[in-house]
Image (spheres, rainbow, N blue to C red):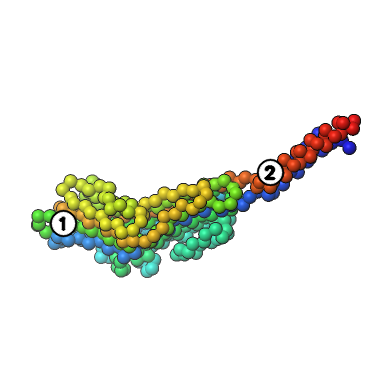
Amino acid sequence: MKLGKKQMGVLVGAALSLGVAGQASADVYGLSQLQLDNLLINFTGVTGGSAGLFTFTTNQDATLNGVSDLSNGQASCAGNFPSPGTCVGVNPVLSGTVQNAPGGGAVRGENDYQKFGTTAEYSNAEAAIVTATLAGGGPTSTKSISESNLQTGTGAQANTLVSSNTFLNLTFAVSDFGGAFNIAFDAIIDVLSKVTGLDQGIAQANSSLTVVLQKAGQTLASWAPNGNNVVTTCGAGLTCTASERGVSLNNSTSSNGAANQVAGSGSYRLDVAGLTTGLYTLALASTTSTDLARIPVPVPGTLLLIGAGLLAGARATRRNKRIA
């Protein structure tokens, strides 16, 4: 029996179709979770003035295989201390609509911060200002999570933003050191990226937190806690000291295989001394994000099937030629 070109094509095509059907499965996973608790701001050497105007903002987005959650994940409110203004929510004070990218197998609920892990393919995000001193609550606390996992898809992204801006109208007592300011809080963080299985992929997960103090539009102090007690900017005439008893809150992890993780908890504080009378702006912003990509590859057994099929076809062709 002689194998013609058409029959050989069918054989090769069948082997290749087995390769597509037998694609290796994998999990390309990213997680970024950040929680702040007991956040307090204090000024010393102040004889007058007030916290003044403040605005809060949260936002979250999620995309899976190019399709995004179409609901608006942004929310904002504002007040003039001590009035809470439009920030009248109670636990949480402010939270936009939770984001679940269409087609995901793990659905996050409103104010749901559980970790789904590699249980399904999904991409979602949620963030909230849970309590806020300026809005009449206890110590300020925030929560945010971005989490994505790919099993058969090719791409996923998730991100969150929590921010506040406060205008401070302060009059300091006359002293050799001027006014002083400090901000302190506790934090819990988990930033993780990993790829498991035989597919090729890359996972990225990121987190950030920054504090910026300005006067008349000029930055006097800026701080991004990295676990090394370093203040990014400290203006002339000021004394700035950071105390970071915990891991970095500003992280970028990536992986194409083994897990890359930054996780832990700690206490963080910034002290700034030497402030003079004036109008100040204090801004705090935290973000989380994930970014995943997956490239399917055939399993090794499938490649062997393709090779065996081609060899068998070649041998049959040579045998038929000898018979002919």
Question: Is 313 displayed left or right of 268 in the figure?
Answer: right
Q: Is residue 31 above or below residue 83?
A: above
Label 1: few (<14), some (14–19) or many (≥20) C-alpha neighbours in 10 Å: many
Question: Is 287 displayed left or right of 314 in the figure?
Answer: left
Q: Is residue 221 visible?
A: yes
Q: Earlier in the sequence, mark 1 or mark 2?
A: 1
Q: Is residue 161 above or below residue 12?
A: below
Residue tagged 1: 179
Residue 303, numbered label: 2
Instruction: Please identify the quarter of the rendering in which residue 130 is found.
Output: bottom left
**Which residue is found at the position 39% from the left and 51% from the top?**
251
The residues tagged by marks 1 and 2 sit, at their Cα atoms, a distance apart of 72 Å
Q: Which quadrant holds the N terminus?
A: top right
**Which residue is found at the position 44% from the left and 49% from the top?**
253
State the image coordinates of residue 14 (x, y, percent, origin top left): 75, 43
Instruction: Please identify the quarter of the rendering in which residue 11 is found.
Output: top right
